[in-house]
Amino acid sequence: MSTSALLTLDGLTKAYPGVVANDKVSFVIGTGEVHALLGENGAGKSTLVKMIYGLVKPDSGQMTLRGQPFEPAEPRQARADGIAMVFQHFSLFDALNVAENIALGMETPPPMRDLAARIREVSEAYGLPLDPYRTVGALSAGERQRVEIIRCLLQDPKLLIMDEPTSVLTPQEVEILFETLRKLKSEGTSILYISHKLEEIRALCDHATILRLGRNVGECIPAETSARDMAELMVGTALKTPERSDREFGAVALAISDLSVPAPSAFGTALQGLQLSVRRGEILGIGGVAGNGQDELLSVLSGEVTTPREAVMFDGRAIGHMGPTARRALGVLTAPEERLGHAAAPDMSLTENALLTGSVREGLDRRGFLRWGAARSFAEAIITSFDVRTPGPENAARSLSGGNLQKFVIGREVLQRPEVLVVNQPTWGVDAAAAAAIRQALLDLAAGGAAVICISQDLDELMEISDNFAALNEGTLSPPRPTTALTVEEIGLMMGGAHGMEVAHV
Amino acid sequence: MDLSAINPVLLIASLMVAATPLLLAAIGELVVEKSGVLNLGVEGMMITGAIAGFAAAVESGSPLAGFVAAALAGAVLSLLFAALTQIALANQVASGLALTLFGLGLSALMGQRYVGVKPPQMGRIDIPVLSDLPVVGRILFAHDVILYFGIALTAAVWVVLKFTRAGLVLRAVGENHEAAHALGYKVVRIRTLAILFGGACAGMGGAYISLIRVPQWTEGMTAGVGWIALALVVFASWKPWRALLGAYLFGGVTVVQLNLQAAGVAIPVEYLAMSPYLITILVLVILSADKSSAPASLGRSFHASR
């Protein structure tokens, strides 16, 4: 497939204070090749692509582009040399329209009217139709990604870098994206595809480079390598799959009946006609693309948004009117998605963070005075039992890596002996070993008779741990179905299919 | 009470004069906020511009030199704000308040020698034929240069923000500084330039008060116009023409209430004096039903590593 080398990386090294992000990384991307860059969070993938895109300067090592030395000082220069990048967290401006967003990513944009015509033309040609005059804030995640891709395509790139492009897409949308990428490849464009979703890489990529702790630990041809082998290369040890034991479901622990909640903000989602029930011992998985009501559902369950009394029932008691503290006292606990800001206070210590949600159930305060000793031992208990890597509970939450803080946040709730636990994105940005530990903890919790609601965008995770699966799509929740009987195709349709997007005309 | 003493032509002409300091300051702050920076130091920069412009005009004998000096003084003071917030990453609200207090004190110190001094007069533009037209001539064609400059600046800011690439980049930086940085735009540089522009505009607005509107120097003579300018930007939904409308409304009510006071209307003076503030805010609150246009990064510090 690859006839000649497009970009050669040779011994790239980049160190940050206290951590070597990339240690002598070398590999070659061929012309017209789809090259996968595999690795866990913190393996150094992002730093590496930032060096290629000119956002970060390497400490040592060379890059060669088409035989010429390549040292981009800034993204502008990298773009001029035919390198384009689709960012993981979209680098779009909500208040501007599609054409303005695209113009911002170009060196010498044509006048708006010509640009709009070109956007229409190119987006149709690649099967990604877009209206240039729509405001980006009103677009779905899949459409936003289209904007980024079209922005890149208009520059006629030689190398397209895609950082975790499918994490926000439904399976159907992923298929459309892959068609587009295959068409690009057939036109001779190289693609550097960053992901940790192994099956996608096997379906799409010609070649894979695997990074672990900043080092290149292996290369493989994905089509000829099993997903398990690649995963073990990535993690470095044999993977332990969470074990699910057969459980008996008990009585209904938490139920929501016919609840509608208006959108909390202009870009929020309204919940419509919500029906939900979860039994003791059951794990209910709730899937769906981000922004379809996950945060709103969580706040209804946690009590941040109160509802009519009877709309939320716990063990036959109406709790809809109760706030988070009252619900915690009953045993309805939640661990929200955003670690820094929602689930934890970044600048407070782990002890203080443990106190913030644990004080009610763990008795960490007495007549308004804090019991620091008890709070500290509770924090230490979380650190030990969930293997949180930190020098001690006096460290600020912000100083922990994402995965470690996530373990702390989940552990804090699990150790409070919940009757009902609601988690949102429990393993987001967590490495595979830690993710497995968190999933095992949720399974154990359910086995102990608690009801668990797991909201996640990671379908593999939901398939692995949940007993029943329901999908959120534009604020409505599909009826739950047993996970074991579901296919990926059906899940995709439950999530809203391709949201009316067209398949590439290839 | 004698309402017939109020001459509508003179009234309109003088409301434009009353509105210009507010308009200049608001347009400057609008650009600053569009770039995502909240500078609460407008009042401080205005009063510093007022005394710097006044002193320069008195010493040089040229009001135009005074305006240049005022713009420079406002920009220099805003540079302090830029250094604090863009380089040292200090809190923007606290830095802006500090700038206002600093400006008020500094101007009082600088102005000690100038109390009671009369500044040189700014000439009116006199266009033959046009200026002599009845009514229209007096309202539209017989003002000083700076007043026209203020209107031209409003138009220019509108054109730049809406139709040019520079304006698009500025809006992008104010909307999402991380994304703008990822695309290779120099967030800190763009914001610093916007802050300097805002400072220069506020300085000129201040000098307009001390050189043309009043014209004399007294301590604290801006009397909260800087704060009204800040409110005006928000209530004008960050739109230049609405800021102009708001400024003229404020100027208009100010002039009318002064005339009413002079005519001896039986409303307590205090109510008349507060009416410009009340009515301007009321009207703009009604106008600003769509709050969506606030720059999303407004007031947030940017550091490239985060």
Image (cartoon, coloured by chain):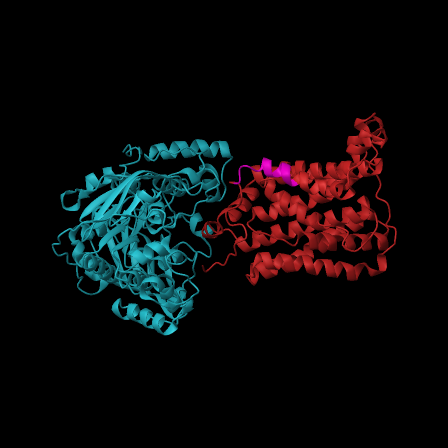
Chain colours: A cyan, B red
Q: Residue at x 19, y 51 (%)?
A: A282
Please name whichever residue, B140 or B6, is drawn nearer the observer in this view of the structure.
B6
x, y percentage for residue A112? 50, 34
The secondary structure making up most of the magenta span is helix
Magenta residue check for B282: yes
Q: Residue furthest top?
A: B134
- Decide which of B294, B255 is in the foreground and name it: B255
Q: Is residue A186 visible?
A: no
Residue A189 position, x and y percent, is: 32, 44
- Furthest residue to the left? A246
Query: In the picture provided, is A423 more to the left or to the right than B238?
Result: left
Residue B24: horizontal and vertical position, in percent?
Answer: 70, 44
For residue A381, which quarter of the picture?
bottom left
Q: Position of residue B6 (x, y in %)?
A: 83, 31
A209 left or right of B97 in image: left
Q: Is residue B199 visible?
A: yes
| Quarter occupied by residue A134 | top left
The foreground one among B139 and A440 is: A440
Viewport quadrant of the C terminus of chain A: top left
Magenta region, residue range: B281-291
Task: Name above or below for residue A143 compared with residue A373.
Answer: above
Whether the magenta-drawn stretch holds residue A333 is answered as no
Q: How many marks?
A: 0
